[in-house]
Image: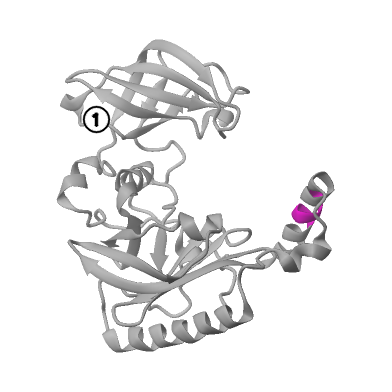
Amino acid sequence: MKKILCVAVFIVLGYFTGVSYANAGAWAPHISDAAEAEAKAKREAIQAEIETLGEHPWAGRYYEGDGLGSNRHLTLAPENGFVYTVHGCLGLYNLSSGNVVQEGGLVKLTFSVENDQKEAREITVAFVPIPWGDRHYLVPSEKMVEFCNQVNRGERIHHFLRFSDKEGESPYRSRHKIATPGLPDVPEKYKPYLRRHHPIEAEITAMGETTNDPRQYFPQKTVVTLDKGTKDGLLPGMTLAVIKPEATDLSSAEVTVTDVKETSAEGILAWQKSSAAPAVGWKLSTRSRWAAPVETTQDTTDKPASEP
């Protein structure tokens, strides 16, 4: 069913772009058969090393994606390095490989095989390994605040999650499951950003300029003033979701805090033009109104696209 949906989407796009499904085999001509074979052999060596390491803080097989059009796999270990692949509806889109070093609390990738394709270049070169209960994430060092915001919102974590040792458990299947109890073990400097158990709620007290960038998913950007500040735990970079009004089309609208004073803050509210225009009195929270209670978990029976 997923493949049929992907093909349908590709055909529709092809109607408007002039790309035919018959040409899908040329989707990634930069990847040779020899490169794929080399990557497969390297991945097998990495997997063999992983099996000798026991409980390791970061070595393993990781996944991030939607199980359909975007599936990113990263397999890595200290001695044999890493292999990174991107799979989609039409097969393998990209691959890179190289070596791994641990330095200053970071897991760093150095490329020995790479290309200039966009998907390959998007992978970071420095990750922070983050344990959370029996789950292990690899988070780009420059996206640690983003990770904390996702934890606070109580929704899906959009970062590499390691395959569990538990039989039948995969990152895609457990991606909607909120690990409990406690908090992820982030570096000390980021701990103040974690508000999972104590959400910050705020109200818009003043409106500023609105700009429009049609290239963005949320094209409308409005400067807003909030009634909470450092005294309440707000920090620059935190995000707060709209919780009132409760219109469905506002469920993804959020404010990114840009400047914080003791009892107030400024931020940028990103929203869709089709939504109700933001107004003084709107209620915000670091926790989404759709999030499940922290004591419970969510699950899904879906599985990720298989990795060759």
Tell me which amino acid carries mark 1. Leu
Foreground residue among 53 and 27: 27
Residue topped by disc 1: 234
Q: Is residue 15 left or right of residue 56?
A: right
Q: In the shown orientation, is residue 193 left or right of residue 111? A: left
- Location of residue 69 with respect to 40 vertically, above or below: above
Q: Main secondary structure of the magenta part?
A: helix
Check if residue 9 falls in the magenta segment.
Answer: yes
Q: How far from the left and from the top, in percent, is residue 210?
A: 49, 15
Q: Residue at x 49, y 30 (%)?
A: 253
Other residues around mark 1 within 10 Å, as few (<14) / some (14–19) / many (≥20)? many
- Vertical position of residue 243 compared to residue 139: above or below: above
Label 1: which secondary element: loop
Residue 19 lies in quadrant: bottom right
- Res 159 quadrant in image: bottom left
Q: Is residue 36 above or below residue 302?
A: below
Look at the image and give the residue range highlighted in magenta. Answer: 8-12
Q: Is residue 278 visible?
A: no
In this view of the protein, which residue sits in the foreground, 239 or 41?
41
Towards the viewer: 98 or 72? 98
